[in-house]
Amino acid sequence: MINKLILAIICLCFTGPNIQAQKFDNLAETPPMGWNSWNTFETNINEQLVKDIADKFVELGLKDAGYEYIVLDDGWMSRERDEEGNLVPDPEKFPNGMKAVADYVHAKGLKFGLYNCAGGKTCAGYPGSRGHQYQDAKLYASWGVDFLKYDWCDTGKLNAKESYITMRDALYEAGRPVVFSICEWGDNDPWEWAEDVGHMWRVTGDIINCWDCEVGHGSWASFGIWKVIELRSKEKTREVAGPGHWNDYDMMEVGNGMTDAEDRSHFAMWSMLNSPLIMGNDLRKATKETLKTLTNKEVIGVNKDPLAVPAFRFNNENNIEIWAKPLENDAWALVFINRNDEAVSIDFDWKKHQLADDLSQQYFKPLDKDYEIRDLFQHKNMGNTSKNLKALIGVHDVLMVTLTPNS
């Protein structure tokens, strides 16, 4: 009897760490910034592409602007696991193996990420992690993976929350800190349970490079920029975002065929909503205007603001969407986005638009004091709120300002 008791205690000691497993702390304290291969390349990825993108991060000033993760999406692995059940990088796409790719990215002072799926197969039909979670996590750690995007295809009757907890625990046991990106498209209300499971979670289906469209794919659809924004605008997602746990509105389509104005509005809104800023374009072909948008440190600063409170829709006047985001030190960020198909002039009377945010307990009171106005895309001051804000906003373009109270 005593021997059995001792054996039971020993077993508990060895299984204890699994019970205590958690997601890694002190990661994604601000929304992660980086690049993902899917939007432009889908499964047409290879080692040289990763090296080229890493080089462009440095050459084009993206690293300096805050971008750090380079993430390979679906299609990096062979169609079958090896005899020991391990994932195998496609030998034609990645002839030197995945560790060599990660080492190249790390040598640039950047971080490296991979994709897999909670089901038996990934969305593109490659081996998923179902039944191999701990094995895969150890393999990722041995390669030096810093970020895991975890999808939700071929999952049958799996429970989403428990499936993501299993992978979270596997990553934690493997011992290498990894940003865990939950990608089940918001179908299982991850904002209600994912804060302790992942560092970011998708709140919508896949994005597509259009302003306000929906493209059907049979049993699912891709959404344009405004469809993505509106899909969860009434959900209680805003209250749960914060350091280490963010609502993810999907990889950005900036530079992927929309107008420069639409790109600016897209980038402004992702920053206002505290979404991770994950680029999805071919950086080797990026135009000067695209890079100007993506490296705008004043707009990125709104995304990274220490108060970490996402924006809310404040008003819609004549199809000019107005969103407001409280910032630290009683400041605010506002965007005026023209959803019309023609340019529109605004004459905005600050005195008629006081703001109150119950979440942050912050208030904009233009009747009590003046606020200095800063245009974040033109990088210039625009006076203060003692006078009306007058501006011409182009088609699908944005005026993004910060309001700083005078002392």
Image (cartoon, rainbow, N blue to C red):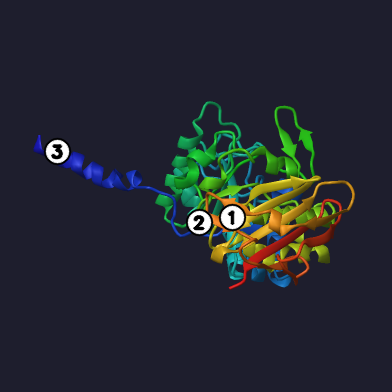
Circle 3 is placed at which residue position? 5
Q: Count neighbours of disc 3 (C-alpha within 10 A) and say few if under 14, some if 14 to 19, many if 20 or more.
A: few
Q: Amino acid at mark 3?
A: Leu
Q: Position of residue 170 (x, y in %)?
A: 44, 46
Amino acid tagged 2: Pro
Mark identifier at residue 397: none
- Residue linked to disc 2: 243
Quarter of the figure that contains the C terminus: bottom right
Question: Please, which residue is most extreme toward the right here?
Answer: 342
Residue 97 appears left or right of 223 = left
Callout 1 secondary element: strand
- The answer, for residue 100, to whether it is visible in the render is yes
Which disc number belongs to residue 113? 1
Q: Are marks 1 and 2 in contact (CB under 8 Å)?
A: no
Q: Residue furthest front?
A: 367
- 179 left or right, relative to 67: left
Q: Nearer the viewer, residue 150 or 184?
A: 184
Q: Secondary structure at mark 3?
A: helix
Q: Residues within 10 Å of mark 2 (few under 14, many from 20)?
A: some
> Could you give the CA–CA distance between mark 2 and mark 3, rounded to whole angstroms?
44 Å
Q: Is residue 287 above or below residue 73?
A: below
CA distance separating discs 1 and 3: 44 Å
